[in-house]
Image (tube, helix red, strand yellow):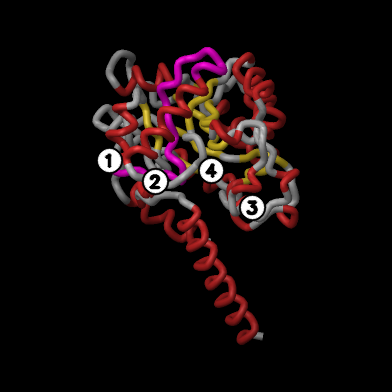
Amino acid sequence: MLKYALAPVGLLLPRKKDGLRVLFYHRINSFSFSQLGMVSREITVQKSAFERQLAHLAQQGYRSITLTEFEEMLTGQQRMDTKTVLITFDDGYADNLEIAAPILKKYGFTAVVFLVSEMIGRNNSVWPMGDPPELGQLMNEKAIRQWLAEGHEIGSHTCSHPDLTTLGNKELTRELEASRDMIEKTFNISCKSLAYPGGDVNERVAAAAEKTGYSLGFSTRSGANWKDTSKLRLMRTEVSASDHHALFCLKLKGVYDWLGFRDTVKYRNTMRRINSLFARHGQAKDSTAT
C-alpha cells in the first residue's frame, strides 16, 4: 500500500537515465503463504508472477547480460546498453534451479546465484525465517553444476551469511576468502563477484572485498548503476512478493530509485508494520461509515 502511495513522487522527480539495472530475487515457488514464515513470505515470488515479469522484460526488448558484460559496460570496455538487465538470486535456494531456471530458459534469459558456501546442500533452518525445513532447501553441488551447465553463473554470498559490518577484520577476511576459494575450487570457475548478506556494507567491508579479489560487490540498495558507481557498492532492485505487476514495471523504470533504501529484513518488517497500520485505519473508517 505504502509503495503505491510513494509512486507519484518518483514519477514527478527527475530520474538519471542510461543506468544498468540489476534485479534481485531470493525464491521462486508456489508455496502457500500460510506454509511460510513471515520473512520468507516477502522474499518468495510466486511462479506465475515471475513468469509474467520475464515475459514483460522480453516484450519490452530487454536481454540479460553476464557478470563480465555488466562489468565491462560499467568500466567502458563495452557500450552501455540500457535495454539489458542482470538477474540475480541470493542464497541459492533449490527452487532457483527447479522452478526459475525453466522460466528463464523459456524467455532466453540467464541469471546469477550468489551462494552461501557453508550452506550448500542444506536448508535454511539456521536462519530465523520461520519455515518448515523442507520448504527451505538450498541447492547442492549437483544442482549447482546443473545450473552452470544451463548457462547461468554463480558468485559468493560469504561462508555463513553474517552481517559483515559487525565482524572483526580477521573474521571478515575469512568470510570473504574462504567462500570465494571454495566456489573456485569446487566448481572450477573464477569467482570475482559478491553479494553482501542483508546488503550490509560499509567502506571497511568494501575495501576488504576488493583486497580479497572481488571486482564486483552487490548491495541491496535500490537503484541503477552508472560508470561512476562504486564497483564494490553496486545497486540492485529487489523484487518481492508484495510487488504486484504494475509495481514491478514501476521499479524497472526507476520510479523508486529516489528512495535509496536498503531492502533488509529490518526494512521489510518495518514496512509490514506500517502497512498493517494503514489497513487497520482503513477498516476503522469503513466501520465508522457504515
Question: Relative to residue 277, is residue 232 drawn left or right?
Answer: left
CA gap between label 3 and label 4 equals: 12 Å
Residue that numbered label 4 is attached to: 239
Neighbours of disc 2 within 10 Å: few (<14), some (14-19), many (20+)? many
Foreground mark, 3 or 2, reads: 2
Residue 103: horizontal and vertical position, in percent? 67, 27
Q: Nearer the viewer, residue 85 or 286?
A: 85
CA gap between label 4 and label 1 equals: 28 Å
Look at the picture and state if 146 lies above or below 126: above
Which corner quadrant of the image does residue 59 belong to?
A: top right
Residue that numbered label 2 is attached to: 200
Q: Amino acid at mark 3?
A: Arg
Look at the picture and state if 15 lies above or below 285: above
Residue 66: horizontal and vertical position, in percent? 47, 19
For image coordinates 56% across by 49% down, the residue present is 243
CA gap between label 4 and label 2 equals: 18 Å
Q: Which residues are magenta?
A: 184-204
For image coordinates 35% across by 38% down, the residue present is 170
Residue that numbered label 1 is attached to: 204
Foreground mark, 4 or 1, reads: 1
Q: Is residue 211 visible?
A: yes
Residue that numbered label 3 is attached to: 41
